[in-house]
Image: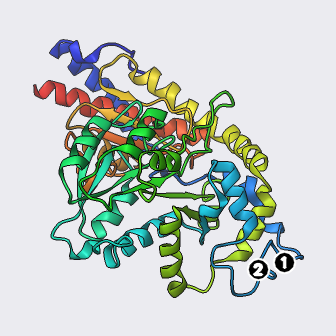
Amino acid sequence: MMNCQDVVSLSREKLTLLLEEAEARYDEFRRAGLKLDMSRGKPGRDILDLNDQLLDKLTPPWKDGDVPDVRNYGGLEGISGMRKLFGELLGISPDSIIVGGNSSLNLMYDAIARLWIFGAPGYTPWSREKQVRFLCPVPGYDRHFAVTAEFGIEMINVPMTSEGPDMDVVEKLVADDPTIKGIWIVPFYSNPEGICCSQRTVERLGAMKCAAPDFRIFWDNAYGVHRLYEDEPEHFPDIFAACEAGGNPDRVLYFFSTSKITFPGGGVAMVAASPANRAEILRRMKIQTISHDKINQLRTLRFLRDPAGVREQMRRLAAVLRPKFETVATILNEELGGSGLASWSNPRGGYFVSLDTLDGCAMETVRLAREAGVTLTGAGATFPYGKDPRDRNIRIAPSFPPVAELEVAMRLLCVCIKIVGIRKLLQK
């Protein structure tokens, strides 16, 4: 193992020796014939097995609240018990919530499509505007960027701070440019850095002056309940209250799902909105479908029960996830701590670790890892158009591999970072 030291400041001779050592370790990994996957935030089997009781929750009675039989048509807004659970868990009004199918990403895509085709209530459809632009905090979630790219919406990078998107940059951009129609935000344990928006950031988002009166915040609270540690507080500053106080009650569209609380692809998603926005969503949604899968909503409600049940489920999940995140942190510190070759986040929740190599090294690092048998999320994926301007960010997804495999994958990744970083230093 390469000793932790300030590699960046070493002489050319010492760098060459360290490179030879790292390349020898890399050759050992290649000969091992590895096939390990850290490409996306997929739960491992050890996490999925915790949800198996969900599959036993489909028994009579089939009634929930004002839905007499969840097996039948009707109930476009979703069952009342699920709306109540989401509302109490997230600290928002159940009356603002529409419960959809399994995918919050689907609801986000539909929201963009509605604004593109029909416009916000009382405003021009975005498709009829000469130009539409969106703010994208980076590094961020590649699926968000894919949705906006699908509609030809131009994306603008906004840097992240320890309190969320850099609000000085955001406020200046939206105040001066009426073509900027929205912003993507993962408010709590952001993907991939694990940053939580502060109360002040939330207040500024609600109150900021926008040149576009139909500006929308896409509030994707994907990881709000995904705490890794018991002493980590719940993070739910009220974005609805902030927008109301700022005189912009229709500004936010709020998304959440149970996809990583229960089964991916088998969860329950929701969108919450102001009365005007909610009415518009339902008006368009009733043309799309007669009702969503209320059977899945009911079994999910019976499995999770109430906010206390959700928190208990998250404690079970955290007990499996926490050792994986700690394995990542331990190996990064052992292999790279103090080297100057990389820096990384130490999230207290969420699903990812964000790692930065030296500039110009991420793509080659990912390529080397792939050739030795470890698949990572593509370098650049955390930026719009897949283009990291500094080619340095790599998203690490620890959730899928067992800890033993994760340790091997992380050792290999660190060796690749050393090889590419030292070669970069020697080029200078």
Q: Position of residue 281 (x, y in %)?
A: 49, 73
Residue visible at 56% across and 85% down? 289
Which numbered marker is on residue 273? none
Q: Of residues 25 and 39, which is closer to you in this image?
A: 39
Residue denoted by label 2:
70
Circle 1 residue: 62
Residue 51 shown left or right of residue 288 in the figure:
right
Q: Is residue 12 above or below residue 144?
A: above
Q: x, y (%) of residue 304? A: 77, 56
Q: Position of residue 45 (x, y in %)?
A: 66, 54
Q: Position of residue 147 (x, y in %)?
A: 35, 65
* Residue type, label 1: Trp
Is 256 in front, or is 341? 256
Kind of element beneath mark 1: loop
Residue name at image x 70 percent, y 38 percent: 319
For the question of whether residue 30 can be seen, the reply is no
Check the picture and name the quadrant holding the N terminus.
Answer: top left
How many numbered callouts? 2
Q: Residue at x 39, y 72 (%)?
A: 121
* Cα distance in 3D space between marks 1 and 2: 6 Å
N-term mark: 1 or 2: 1
Judge left or right: residue 249 versus residue 137. Answer: right
